[in-house]
Amino acid sequence: MLGGCRHCFNLIGICLRLLLECRDIPILGVCLGHQALGYVHGAQVVHASEPVHGRLSEIQHNGCQLFHDIPSGRTSGFKVVRYHSLVIDPESLPEELIPIAWTSSSDALSFLETRKSNTISDDCESQIGCSRSAKSFLECENGSRRPFVLSDKSKRVIMGIMHSSRPHYGLQFHPESVATHYGRQIFSNFRKITEDYWLRLRPYTARMQVPCASQLFREVPRSRHIVNNAGDQLYRKASQISQLTHNAYKKSYSGVSNMVNISHPSTDVRFLRLEWRKFDHLASQVGGAQSIFCELFGHHKAENTFWLDSSSIEKKRARFSFMGGKGGSLWKQLTYRLSDQSDMTFKGGGYLLIEDAHGSTKSKCLEEGFLDFLNKELLSFRYEEKDYEGLPFDFHGGYIGYLGYNLKAECGVVSNRHKSRSPDACFFFADNLLVVDHYNDDVYILCLREECTAMTSWLDSTEEKLFSLKLSAIRLEEQNFQVANFSPFEAGFRAEKSREQYMEDVEKSLRYIKDGESYELCLTTQIRKSIGEIDSLGLYLHLRQKNPAPYAAWLNFSKENLCVCCSSPERFLRLDRNGTLEAKPIKGTVARGETVEDDEQRKLQLQYSEKDQAENLMIVDLLRNDLGRVCEPGSVHVPHLMDVESYATVHTMVSTIRGKKKSEVSVVDCVRAAFPGGSMTGAPKLRSMELLDCLESSSRGIYSGSIGFFSYNQTFDLNIVIRTVVVHEGEASIGAGGAIVALSNPEAEYEEMILKTRAPAKAVMEFL
């Protein structure tokens, strides 16, 4: 199957060679593959009347074998998801290409609109037309041809073609999308077509003739001159990327075998043992998670401390908070910076500084990058599962910190245009930690040690401190945090880009989308304010009170003069001890209303927003693709699609994607397959990140990356770094942005970006 949606133009050269030279191999082209099938036989590829991305259309077809047992036409229930800005001009189809499917109406639908009439009509049309000219014909099941006429063809879009003599099919829509109806049936039908084809051919041929892989990168010959600009762009891309495709594709999309590190653990194998204690219903007795953190870890400006803080636990969004500081003999800090890239092209590797529990430091050059180092570290641990039996959470000690956005360069992107001011990754190895179970009000303390060493006194001393705590006499009162009319610039923040510049970048993004370079571009920017020396922990405590979130976090890397105050509502990716991967992307955000009625109206507005549904659906399909690279076939599913969740200052649209990790895939392989989170990049992912590097004027740094843990026993949980104040070297920075899609309005996009800065910016203003 040939598809263009995930690989963008990196596969055009391969697609065109395959279609031309593999005449006797059944091929199903999807999206770009569909356009390539038309292009190599002389059809024109033109701009669509409007880009359609993440929206659905009802389809009518001719009943050929590819659509066997699938209804057709309006109200039939056959609705498909479309991601395209270019189309095949039906008037230019050569005789050898036969149209087999068209949109049944000129209007695209949102996901929720299609659910209003989700039943399949029993009165499906048996002969539904589509036309390209008076010479148009469609192939019936018996191989004969019949005329196929479609009224008002100018408003319909061709959605499927087939070759008259070769087993080649093309579909403009995406049968693999989570919202496409009968997608599984289409693939089943194509499999049957393939099986039948080889059964018929077997008596006449002993083997397939497949051209050598290296020959697929030669320049593609033309079978007919095409004068349309969009078609020329498609052809130019094919020839331009022929030399670049091999390296980029091998690095990221040549399959799991290339992506997964089949690396052996280092010879420095470490056998770790875990000791832990549980205290039932203790948390509320000692003032809750905030009181515990401040009393146990908040002294000396909370230097070298961490707190993965589930400060918003309603509706079971999150359950556990993990906290700690500089601990026992295994504690260390990793600080990683990518190597300088003076030629703006990533050459690989970077520099790692390691500080141990005694304060000694050493540096090393990591030619293969930080993620490869982390992978080897995690694979080197040995442990006894019985040590953590009875613990209801998955972090039992290990690495805790952040991955910066620029680590995309270790996940398939071939360039990093902007260098981050802050380290590209910073982690503690936490060997002592405290956990609060917010559901049951329990407290756990854990100590990780090497097998050959005796248990430390940390458990005893921490237990003693817990029971000496008294319920705080000062309790934070609940406050309504109204930010609707607040501007961050009132607080003295300076914008990286002016309103006019940001809106111009939105316009540029829309042009990229119209030209088929991307479906969705998550454009971002940052605001900054000089704040000097402040109580950063106090700022975080104020932020968590004003804007509680399920994936909030506090990180203090004191030697880097770096504190991260995060109130993120979004999970990037989690792997639990049962091998289940889960992503929870957010796409679609509106401000809370000032009255109950207004608030409910805004929530409904988000729920039924066609633009926000399109944004969310595109990222869900992207993440299904990312997880599909590391999960068992057929295990990736979407238990929750486009749920609206409400937080202190905003309503958001959230989906949940899950899958079962393949046994041979490592923890870091899972992260590498999906990082950075698709909700912060757009789709297709790699091409979108390349475009964003050109549109954005500086590195995102920690913003858009991930904060979380990698447990020594091969689990992890990472958030998306949004709604975050990064305090670095006396400056506070806040990143924000939004997904630009074909339906975007530049002014509305600017206002959405400002909305996302309001809660953290106001927290800074109120605290100073």
Image (cartoon, rainbow, N blue to C red):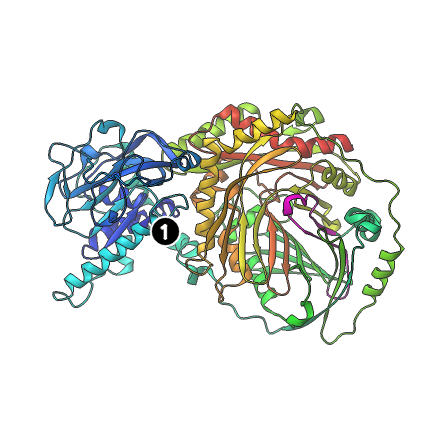
Give x and y (percent) for residue 486.
67, 25
In front of the other: 364 or 399? 399
The reply, left or right, for residue 142 in relation to residue 521 is: left
Vertical comparison of 660 with 121: above or below: below
Determine which residue is flagged by label 1.
245
Identified at 45% across, 41% down, the residue is 617
Residue 122 place in picture, x, y as percent:
28, 41
Badge 1 amino acid: Thr
Extent of the magenta region:
306-330
Using residue 559 as the reference point, say whether residue 229 is left or right of it: left
Q: Specify few, some or many for label 1: CA neighbours under 10 Å numbering under 14, 14-19, or 20 or more.
A: some
Magenta stretch: includes residue 650? no
Single out the residue that lies furthest toward the front: 122
Residue at the image point whose x is 47% and y is 26% from the top = 745
Q: In this view, does 608 lie above or below 272?
A: above
Q: Which of 560 and 20 is in front in this view?
A: 20
Residue 682 at x, y percent in the picture: 47, 41
Q: Quadrant of residue 153?
A: top left
Residue 311 colored in magenta in the image: yes
Q: Would residue 340 be seen by someone viewing this image from the given angle?
A: no
In percent of the image, x 64 and y 64: which residue is there? 712
**Label 1 SS:** helix
Query: Which residue is painted at 18% across and 54% down in the image?
Result: 23
